[in-house]
Image: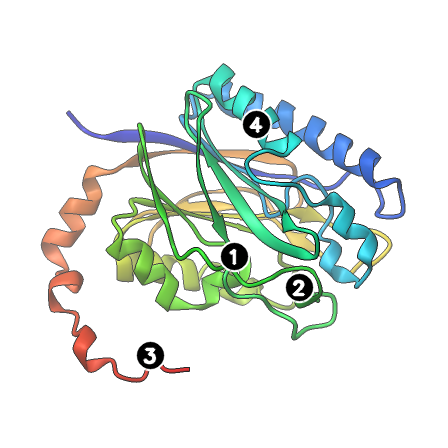
Amino acid sequence: MPRITRAALIQCSNPLAADQPLAKIKEAMIEKHLGLIKQAAEKGAQVCCLQEIFYGPYFCAEQQVRWYETAEAIPDGPTVKLMQDVAKRHGMVMIVPIYEQEMMGVYYNTAAVIDHKGAYLGRYRKHHIPHCHPGFWEKFYFTPGNEGYPVFQTAFGKIGVYICYDRHFPEGARELGLSGAEIVFNPSATVAGLSEYLWKLEQPAHAVANQYYIGAINRVGREQPWNIGEFYGQSYFCNPRGQIMVQAGRDTDEVVVADLDLDMIQEVRNVWQFYRDRRPESYTKIAKA
């Protein structure tokens, strides 16, 4: 019997300006996402991934300590607990990217992974932290990830997570493949004029090189008052041959759903023996600082 997983991506805009009370912003975004998650469930999604730091704006457009107040513990914070209930209600695996506080003064850009029965499976902490473009001041907010590149066994396949800027680095993408990932989600926040020319280039290349599915998510709209650019959406799934299967628009809230034939991974690997033919002993400079 074919192994088909119906997966969903959610892209959406932030309804409130960043000068509103933090609790109000968070509440509005969570409420908006609950409706979109319900839509994904109604479309039969078995796995659903939200966008990077889904419950607020992309606050790295400025450097202000007030945003530290939006961070939560994982898994014991209120948002992950809520999403555990949501996952159980819909019978759907959830990938939930939030701002994580490990301890006072130590924060991560993290995605929690929850199974279809509501159990917390673990987390991925973003490894590669940019601080190189106006409006992307992430080192002010995030400690680099320190828990490797985990792959989570779920009822609907083996799932890995890479977050936004991570996608520019092939090394972690390969680590996920070596650990058995069948679907890799990349929740992002990126704007036109900066990365759009890479959006449909790098991740299909990772899918081909590592022979798994990728779900790429980007938010939409312009966030005030910073207006660092247009978050151009275009969330998509691509298959292990690097072919884009389905894609969202660039300026609309949208639930993207695709049926992922996990048996295709074996078919592709039977043709392209990249894992057999790799030569890790010869890559002497990759792991050097």
- Nearest to the observer: residue 151 or residue 267: 151
Q: Residue at x 83, y 34 (%)?
A: 24
Mark 3 or 1, nearer chain start: 1
State which tag comes first along the sequence, 2 or 1: 1
Residues tagged 3 and 1 counted as in contact (Cβ below 8 A): no
Residue 206 location, x and y as percent? 35, 60
Q: Position of residue 201 (x, y in %)?
A: 43, 63
Say which residue label 3 marks. 286
Q: Which mark is residue 126?
A: 1
Q: Position of residue 52 (x, y in %)?
A: 59, 48
Q: What colour scheme has been applied to the protein in the rendered image?
A: rainbow
How far is the residue under mark 2 from the one under mark 3? 24 Å
Q: Residues within 10 Å of mark 4 (few under 14, many from 20)?
A: many
> Rounded to the nearest whole Å, what is the CA distance between mark 2 and mark 4?
25 Å
Residue hosting label 2:
138
Asked if labels 4 and 1 touch by Cβ distance under 8 angstroms, the answer is no
Spatial CA distance of label 3 from label 1 is 19 Å
Q: Is residue 192 visible?
A: yes
Amino acid type at circle 3 is: Ile
Label 3 neighbourhood size at 10 Å, few (<14), some (14-19), many (20+)?
Answer: few
Q: Residue at x 76, y 61 (%)?
A: 61
Judging by the rendered image, the residue that carries numbered circle 4 is: 83
**Considering the numbered disc 2 on the image, is that residue within a helix, a strand or a loop?**
helix
Q: Is residue 197 above or below residue 88?
A: below
Q: Earlier in the sequence, mark 2 or mark 3?
A: 2
Please, what is the three-letter code of the amino acid marked with disc 2? Glu
Secondary structure of the residue carrying numbered label 4 = helix
Q: CA distance from mark 1 to mark 4?
A: 20 Å
